[in-house]
Amino acid sequence: MIETDILIIGAGPCGLFTVFEAGLLKLRCHLVDSLPQAGGQLTEIYPKKPIYDIPGYPDILAGELVERLMEQIAPFHPGFTLGERAERIEKMEDGRFKLTTSRGTEHAAPVIAIAGGLGCFEPRKPPIGNIVDFEDKGVEYIIKDPEFYRNKRVVIAGGGDSALDWSIFLADVASEVTLVHRRTSFRGALDSVEKVMELNAEGRIKLITEAQVTGLNGNGHLEDVVIKHKTEGEMIKETDHFIPLFGLAPKLGPIAEWGLNIDRNAIEVDTVDYSTNVEGIYAIGDINTYPGKLKLILCGFHEGTIMVQSAFKRIYPDKKLSFKYTTVNGVQGFES
Amino acid sequence: MEDTIKITVIDREDQEHILEAPTDMNMNLMEVCKSYDLPVKGTCGGMALCSTCHCYVESDHELAEMSEDEEDMLDQAFFVDDEKSRLGCQIHISEGLDGLVVKLAPEAE
């Protein structure tokens, strides 16, 4: 069991900076995130976009801001559980919370800070009526082990890097690869696009553009897909697997089941300390809502800062806390 | 009112909403819909990085050409209509759009 003072759900900018503010109060933090890397949306969606409203930085790339935050919190040695979704929260006998992830990793802490941003990033599912029936029976949204497709027939849909890269990779593994894309041009890296064109010309990938997969058929397991071409109409393609790769979209996910007051996909908080209706659970950053809420990184930093003061009082009810400027003593990190 | 245009938005229940949009506030269609509490998420905040403001342009207004970013994002959207689909966040509110009619695209899972 991983034990800490503040368990932060979400390793985006707001969760990361909270480690710093908690560290100044000698509180330790551990972060849990469903993505395999820290940074949240900034790393996952827009690492190369400049941000212009971080005080002191006229402009900074989102990815760079995450690097700076990681550097800033390093003295406080935060722990990370990455690539695992926070699934369940239970109250333990000693008053602390136990959080279990999608992979069964257990964490215990007296305080939980939900800094979950927009929720968990999950694969976008194409709106094909019966797609759910074939999940893990021929339909996979994520390729976990390419060997799984050895000597199998595969249909991939999508036009981005992951669709291109996997088509190229699986050309050597699967017995047959068909790539279906809505347009004739691709948004992926140029050399991947060229490689796909080359493999198509050699007959090692079957590329079908201006088309979409619109139907799935099979008895228990996927047997064929319906591909609808813009001008040529529908065709049936026999296949063992259909892999739709349309990127990730955020979903509130299990957070909705934790007994917290939710208003339009956001957690209601008291702005005195950003506490939720469950004592000991706080919500900061884009995931919370209150009158006048602005979804800004800047505001998330403020919320985390205020929140750790309240968390301290919950963890050490009898301890005196004095507020200090970093200019007075500098930053005293933890030994390890 | 001066500096405002009228836009008709048809929601996913086929209900028509007539919105008054200011042309001098540097707004886009996604933001106007949100300011009227219409069910448009605008998750990415207007960077053409999600597709929650996907809509169909039903009137014959001349819109600015799609950027590469918008085209790319529509690749990850569903229910795309090559003739009509646009991202609301990429439709900049300007005088020429008075009388625009758009329909919100269905929400994907």
Image (cartoon, rainbow, N blue to C red):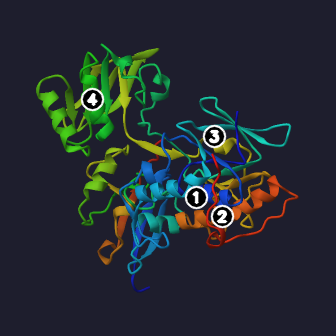
Disc 4 on helix, strand or loop? Answer: helix
Q: CA distance from mark 1 to mark 4?
A: 39 Å
Q: Residue at x 27, y 66 (%)?
A: B61
Nearest-to-viewer mark from 2 and 3: 2
- Gap between marks 3 and 1 measured at Cα: 24 Å
> Which numbered disc, 1 or 2, marks the residue that appears first in the sequence?
1
Q: Chain of mark 1?
A: A
Q: Nearer the viewer, residue A236 or A94?
A: A94
Q: Which residue in the protein does label 1 denote?
A: A17
- Work out whether disc 2 and disc 3 sit on a shared chain: yes
Image location (x, y in percent) of residue A178: 25, 26
Residue at x-position 16% and y-position 28%: A199
Q: Chain of mark 4?
A: A
Q: Work out how far the residue at label 3 is from the one at label 4, CA to CA, in angstroms.
A: 32 Å
Task: Judge from the rendering whether residue A330 lies leftward or rightward of residue A48; answer left or right.
Answer: right
On the question of residue B17 being in view, the answer is yes
Measured along the vertical axis of the image, is residue A153 above or below residue A105? above
Chain containing mark 2: A
**Tag 3 or tag 2, which sits nearer the N-term?**
3
Among numbered discs 3 and 4, the one appearing first in the sequence: 4
Q: Of the residues under marks 4 and 2, which one precedes in the sequence?
A: 4
> In the drawing, what numbered circle is on residue A254?
3
Which residue does the numbered mark 4 point to in the structure image? A167
Residue drawn at 31 percent across, 45 percent down = B75
Q: CA distance from mark 4 to mark 2?
A: 46 Å
Whether pointer 4 and pointer 2 mark residues with C-beta atoms closer than 8 Å, the reply is no
Q: Nearer the viewer, residue A200 or A229?
A: A200
Disc 3: host chain: A
Return the residue at label 2: A305
- Across and down, in percent, residue A333 comes to 63, 55
Badges 4 and 2, same chain: yes
